[in-house]
Each structure stands twice: as structure tokens, then as C-alpha cells.
Image: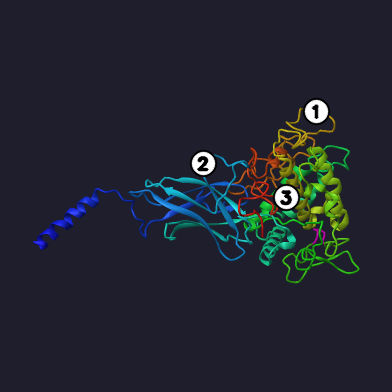
Amino acid sequence: MSTIANAWFVPIAAIVAAFVWQPKAATAQTVALIEIRSSPETEDDFLCWSPVRARARLSQPSSDDLAVTLRGAGVGPSAGAVGFMAGTSPVTRANYAPKEELQIVLKADGSWTEFFLMGVKASDGGKDIAVRAELANGTSIGQTVTMVRVRKNAEHLSPKERNNFLSALAQWKIIPGLARPTRFEDFFTTHADAFSKGIHSAFGSMPSNFLPWHRAFLLNFERELQSIDPTISLPYWKFDEPSPHLFSADFLGAKLPGSNEVDLAATNPIRGWSAPSGQPLTRARAADTMAPMAANVLPALACTSDSCPDEFRETTDKFEMNYHNGAHGFILGWLGGGASPRDPLFFLLHANVDRGWAHWQQVRDRYDSASKLSYTPEGAYPGSVKDGMKEGLYANDEMWPWGQKQGNWGTPNTTDDDWLPYRFPFPSAPGLPLSETDYPTPAKMIDYMGAFHGADLGFCYDDVHYVDNGPSGVIAGEQ
């Protein structure tokens, strides 16, 4: 009797179970796809502090939805870290609240589930973070690899970061095997040609676009280096502190005793750096044991909302006259004239000036390019010069040498050679705005992290966060 009962019990139990819904268990074949910037390409899988759109889905349709947890796993103790936020509505500085992990549901039909991804700790010179989709038991069913690419204090770069930067710099100057001339001469001749055409204020006597023009100039340079090595960010020279590592033969050069020539180690990739004429790199001073200026020369770098200058015009003159001119004047040599970009130290000097502007922008919340508080003059060139305001200085004007309109800037380009110093196309970057046909304007340089209504330009600084204090529990940029 018991044998017969058991024979009937098994199939009946199976029938009952078939009518009770249970989530489908993931199998070894279940795979999740994860895309940063909602693109299958890996060339744009680089983060800064700004939130970027990302998405995940099952690689093949399934009979059931699948719950997973998104986590970032760093490779090595000095790896970067990422944060997550749910939803599809734009992230703002007001609702910015990244989490170390995020639970999402991958849809059975294989459609995308969107979320936001952002850097919360800088990487160490490479893609060192795996963004994973994990099951409840911790099994990873899919991942993509990224890095948090941040501009850092040159004095604190790891050996890997320093060597990556120097190697790319050497290739950029020489550009072996490419069917175009070196960009090195383009950069310093362009800066020299524009020296008195708005990118400097002539010691405060005329309006300028000094800060946004140099921000675009730096970004152009940085993107060209990244076309050689995409892991690179432009370091900055914090010139209110001594920088013995930066001013060494292994980095940007040590001044030879009794001479203005700069010594570069035999193993340094940029050894032999010289002008096209063959003139060796020169500096009158080095900042290895002393700094060009004290930190209190420009309070904006450590200011509060009460102590900061309030308007852009006042601020830009302070940055140029005090902070910027003091650093150039201390080093001299190649840095003492309009062709100063011949010295690679130029770009690190100006990155620090730009960093100071970024600090001021955050403290004063100056990201609205339509307001004279954030930039002066607003709007577009009205058609005639007034109060020294030339075409190219207004917020919505194309800036020379990138734009097609030359205006009052200089000699118009009359040939099809895009590599002339009077006009060269702005380098595009995967997943980021600005390109050969989307020219920089002062307005496009203002909200560089997309914190107001602008577009994330793909760069940020290790001590200037998306919000004032960085994400909860993890300070962005903290090393």
C-alpha cells in the first residue's frame, strides 16, 4: 500500500510545484552586459567625478527578470573607486548621493536597465576598477573595466603615472610615423600669436577671456596626449609649495648649476627636449626647494563664500596678475615670453591656475555662463567693438584658433591645411563634447563638470569635487 501511495505522491507533488511561481535561478550561462556612457565601445570608458549614464542587460532573453547587485572592485590597494545612483532623471548637485553598490533588476526581455556611474576615488594610472553585476551569492555574471581619470598634483604622481605622462609627451612632440607635422610648434606659435589678442588682459587694462581660453588650450593638449595614451590626465604644478620631484632630472628637469639649461636624465623619455632651432630648454630658476609664492597670495584657493571675489571680471584679473604672472616670472627662461608653451612646464603651471578657477567656481557656485557673475561679457559679439570687448571674448563666441570665424583675432586661414597655427580643429574624444566641428566658446568652458546645465568635458581635479564635500562616506579625490 505504501509503495502505491508513494508512486502517486511523486507526480502529484510535481504538478502542484509547477503551478507555484518561482524566480528562475541563474545558470552558469547567464551573462550580463554593462556599458559605460551607454556605448558598447571601450574607448569612452573613463570617469571623472561627474555622473555619467550607464546601463546593463542580460545578453540573451530569459523567462524571468534577474536581480543583481552592481559593485566596483578595485585591482590593487591604490586602485580607484566608483559610486552608483539609480534612475534615469539627470543627477544634479542637489540630489548627488552615490552609493558603493546598487541593486537593479535585469529585465527578462533583454532590454536595458539604466543607472548612473561616477568616480569617487582617483585611479593610479590605468583601468583598475571592474564594475561588476553580481548574484546574491557574490558570483559575477558580467563586468566592464574603467578608471577614474583625474588631474593630480604632479608632486604626488606615482612612478607609473609620471612615466606614462613623460612617454606620451615625448611621442606627442616627435610624433614618429604620423602623416602630419608635430603639434609642438603649433602650440607655442599659436599662444605667441594670441598673446595680446584677448588671452591676456595686458596687466588689467583690457577685458580678456584668459581663464576659459587657457582651459580650452589645456584640454586640447590633454586630449592629444590621451590619443597616444588614454589613461593620462594632465598633472598640475602646485606652485605655492616646493616641488623637488617635479623639478628633478627624472621628471621635468633640474637646472644645471651655473647655467640656465635644464638637465634631463638619460632614462627620461623627454631627454633632449629643445626648440625647433635646436636651442635647449632653459629656466632661470627651479622650484625644487622654494615656491614662487605663498598660498595666501590668492585667497580664492582656500576661500570661503565670504572671502572670495564675487564676480568673474575681478577674479580673472587676480588669477592672471598675481597667481599666474608670479609663477611665470619666477621661472623665466622659456616661460618668460609669449612662446612659453615650448616648455612643457607651461601646461602644468596653467593647470594649477585653472584648478584655482575651479575652486572659485565651486565656492561661489559660478557655473551659469549667462550670468556676468560667472563670465563677462555675456551673450555674443554685437557686431562692433565696445569698451575693448572684441569678437571672441563674448561668452557665446567661437574662440580662436579653433573656430571658423577669425573676427578680430588674427589672419584668417586661407588654405585647407588644418594644421596651420592660425586654426586647428579641436580634438574629439569618445563620449565627450567638443570636436573638430563643435568649437570651444567661453560659455562651453564654464560648467566643465556638467554641474549646472553644461556638459561634462571629461576632466576634473583631485581636490575639486562634484559637490563641496564629495560623496557621503568617500571623499572624492582622497588619496
Quadrant holding the N terminus: bottom left
**Which of marks 3 and 2 precedes in the sequence?**
2
Q: Nearer the viewer's eye, disc 2 or disc 1?
A: 2
Q: Nearer the viewer, residue 207 or 429?
A: 207
Main secondary structure of the magenta stretch: loop
Q: CA distance from mark 2 to mark 1?
A: 44 Å
Q: CA distance from mark 2 to mark 3?
A: 32 Å
Image x and y of residue 14, in percent: 21, 54
Residue to which mark 2 is pinned? 88
Which residue is found at the position 83% from the left and 43% from the top? 200
Q: Secondary structure at mark 2?
A: loop
Which residue is found at the position 75% from the left and 72% from the top? 266
The span picked out in magenta is 274-278
Image x and y of residue 52, in percent: 57, 47
Specify whether residue 135 is painted magenta.
Answer: no
Q: Is residue 319 above or below residue 232?
A: above
Disc 3: CA contacts within 10 A as few (<14), some (14-19) or many (>=20)? some
Label drawn at residue 218? 3
**Which of marks 3 and 1 precedes in the sequence?**
3
Label drawn at residue 384? 1
Q: Secondary structure at mark 1?
A: loop
Q: Secondary structure at mark 3?
A: helix
Quadrant holding the C terminus: bottom right
- Residue 29 lies left or right of residue 331; in this view the side is left
